[in-house]
């Protein structure tokens, strides 16, 4: 194994952004540990990234279980000798109203989108502290900016994640560990396919992956895109409640074309 080869770990690598990131790192000659629950689709990702020139290693993992994540990190260290970059990408979506909510579905969104990444930090941190370096990348969402009717669980889980990642970024500097927050807009995936509302500037996953990997290589602390949506969410965040309520109402009634 070439000592200069980057050692990458990616969760949620069976589809969407995770798969696209694995392929992009394969194109750049990296060794990639692929984590997800779907072994068949992980092997598809492995084949795709190896056709680009990298090497893939499959490990079935449910990020909501600490023991599974710990086993996956041990597998990565035993296979590659360490972890340079861990991209914690596994996530799910779902729509439901607060009135009549399914509390178990609400809880599951937090288990995957928030606690799944917390599990990742808890298991990866000792390895990177021992190394004295490393990057941990959390895939969040621009949807964290404010509460929106119908997606309260998803938006809340991403808002919690953003605050956690910001805390970790500051705390872990002392160990030589860089924490990077990624906030994409709408990216084509199995998650966005289920959305029934209009998704402006919907982006292909491979284009999103290039933006993310380039940002990681430039050591950015935050990677947000596309810029028109970044600007829109910023305006939405600072808008007074009556104006925001009106904007949300107009946006939510516009159906996906």
Image: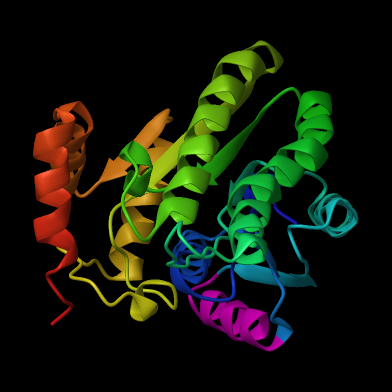
Q: Residue furthest front?
A: 99
**In this view of the protein, can residue 139 be seen by the observer?**
no
How many numbered markers are drawn? 0
Camera-side residue: 224 or 253?
Answer: 253
- Residue 59 place in picture, x, y as percent: 78, 70
Camera-side residue: 197 or 234?
Answer: 197
Is residue 48 rendered magenta in the image?
yes
Q: Is residue 54 above or below residue 125?
A: below
- Residue 192 place in picture, x, y as percent: 36, 72
> Which of the 4 image quadrants contains residue 36?
bottom right
224 on left or right of 180:
left
Q: Residue furthest top?
A: 174
Residue occupying image coordinates x 68% and y 54%: 111
Q: What colouring does the structure picture have?
A: rainbow
Q: Is residue 110 above or below residue 257?
A: above
176 on left or right of 225:
right
> Which of the 4 image quadrants contains residue 83?
top right
| Image quarter in which the N terminus is found | bottom right
148 on left or right of 31:
left
179 on left or right of 84:
left
Is residue 81 rendered magenta in the image?
no
> Which of the 4 image quadrants contains residue 107?
bottom right
| Image quarter in which the C terminus is found | bottom left
Which region shows up in magenta?
Answer: 40-53
Q: Is residue 131 above or below residue 27?
A: above
- Residue 173 place in picture, x, y as percent: 61, 15
Residue occupying image coordinates x 51% and y 71%: 19
- Residue 109 place in picture, x, y as percent: 59, 58
**In this view of the protein, can residue 19 be seen by the observer?**
yes
Q: Main secondary structure of the magenta part?
A: helix
């Amino acid at each position: 194994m070439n000592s200069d080869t980057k050692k990458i770990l990616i969760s949620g690598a069976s589809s969407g952004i995770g798969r696209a990131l694995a392929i992009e790192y394969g194109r750049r000659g990296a060794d990639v540990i692929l984590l997800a629950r779907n072994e068949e689709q992980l092997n598809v990702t492995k084949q795709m990234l190896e056709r680009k020139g990298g090497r893939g290693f499959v490990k079935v993992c449910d990020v909501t279980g600490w023991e599974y994540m710990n086993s996956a990190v041990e597998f990565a260290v035993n296979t590659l000798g360490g972890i340079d970059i861990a991209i914690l990408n596994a996530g799910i979506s779902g729509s439901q109203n607060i009135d009549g909510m399914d509390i178990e579905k609400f809880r599951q969104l937090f288990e995957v989108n928030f606690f799944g990444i917390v599990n990742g930090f808890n298991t990866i941190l000792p390895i990177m502290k021992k190394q004295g370096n490393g990057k941990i990348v959390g895939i969040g969402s621009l949807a964290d900016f404010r509460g929106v009717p119908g997606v309260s669980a998803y938006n809340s889980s991403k808002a919690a994640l953003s605050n956690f990642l910001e805390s970790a970024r500051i705390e872990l500097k002392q160990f030589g560990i860089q924490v990077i927050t990624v906030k994409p807009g709408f990216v084509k995936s199995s998650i966005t396919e289920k959305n029934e509302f209009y998704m402006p500037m919907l982006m292909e996953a491979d284009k999103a992956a290039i933006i993310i990997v380039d940002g990681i290589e430039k050591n950015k602390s935050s990677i947000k895109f596309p810029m028109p949506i970044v600007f829109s969410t910023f305006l939405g965040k600072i808008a007074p409640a009556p104006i925001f309520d009106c904007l949300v109402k107009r946006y939510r009634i516009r159906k996906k074309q």
